Amino acid sequence: MTQNQTQMEKLKDITFYTMDKAIRTYRIFAQKRLRDNGYKITIDQWLIIKAILENPGISQQEIGEKVFKDNASVTRIIELLVKSEYLEREVNQNDRRKSNLKVTVEGKRIIEKVHDLVLENRKTALAGILPEELEILNKTLKRIISNCN
């Protein structure tokens, strides 16, 4: 074994491991809070509804890109949202093989109901972090994204 192999960094010291752990920990925390407050919606379902509300006429592929999900996962989540009556499909008049997704009144209602809890979750997760620290973090993360694109 070489000197480098014996001195390999530990997982806990790898920045990207820590970033992934922070995101996963937050998602578990936020999902539990949704369940504990009686909401029958997942974080991923919430993200997809938000993506459609913010981007009317968005395609499933574009939704996947926005919420970092593969097409099969997006399709499954959309099916559940249609069954829950948070979304409805309308036939696309320009291409009958495609459908347009529309957020229902019930879908808008769940997003509004969950909004305050989402803000509370973020506040809890960001407690003790100064605005300047968040600004540096956001700039750093955007630079990483840019470097990798």
Image (tube, grey):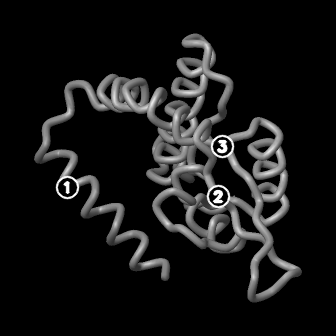
Q: Nearer the viewer, mark 1 or mark 3?
A: 3
Helix, strand or loop under label 1: helix
Residue 136 is marked as 1
Earlier-in-chain disc, 1 versus 2: 2
Report the side of 99 relative to 66 (left or right): right
- Residue type at numbered disc 3: Gln
Name the one closer to the observer, 5 or 97.
97
Check whether the beta carbons of the residues at disc 1 and disc 2 lie within 8 A of each other.
Answer: no
Residue drawn at (68%, 24%) of the image: 40
Report the side of 105 relative to 70 (left or right): left
Earlier-in-chain disc, 1 versus 3: 3
Q: Position of residue 67 (x, y in %)?
A: 59, 58
Q: Position of residue 68 (x, y in %)?
A: 62, 61
Query: Disc 1 versus disc 2: distance between alpha carbons?
Result: 37 Å
Earlier-in-chain disc, 2 versus 3: 3
Check whether the beta carbons of the residues at disc 1 and disc 3 lie within 8 A of each other.
Answer: no
Query: Disc 2 versus disc 3: distance between alpha carbons?
Result: 14 Å
Residue 45 is marked as 3
Q: Nearer the viewer, mark 2 or mark 3?
A: 2
Query: Disc 1 versus disc 3: distance between alpha carbons?
Result: 30 Å
- Residue type at numbered disc 1: Ile
Q: Residues within 10 Å of mark 3 (few under 14, many from 20)?
A: some
Report the residue marked by disc 2.
102
Helix, strand or loop under label 2: strand
Residue drawn at (63%, 17%) of the image: 35
Name the one closer to the observer, 52 or 27.
52
Screen quadrant of the N terminus: bottom right
Up the image or down, 23 lies above or below 91; here it is above
- Residue type at numbered disc 2: Lys
Name the one closer to the observer, 79 or 43.
79
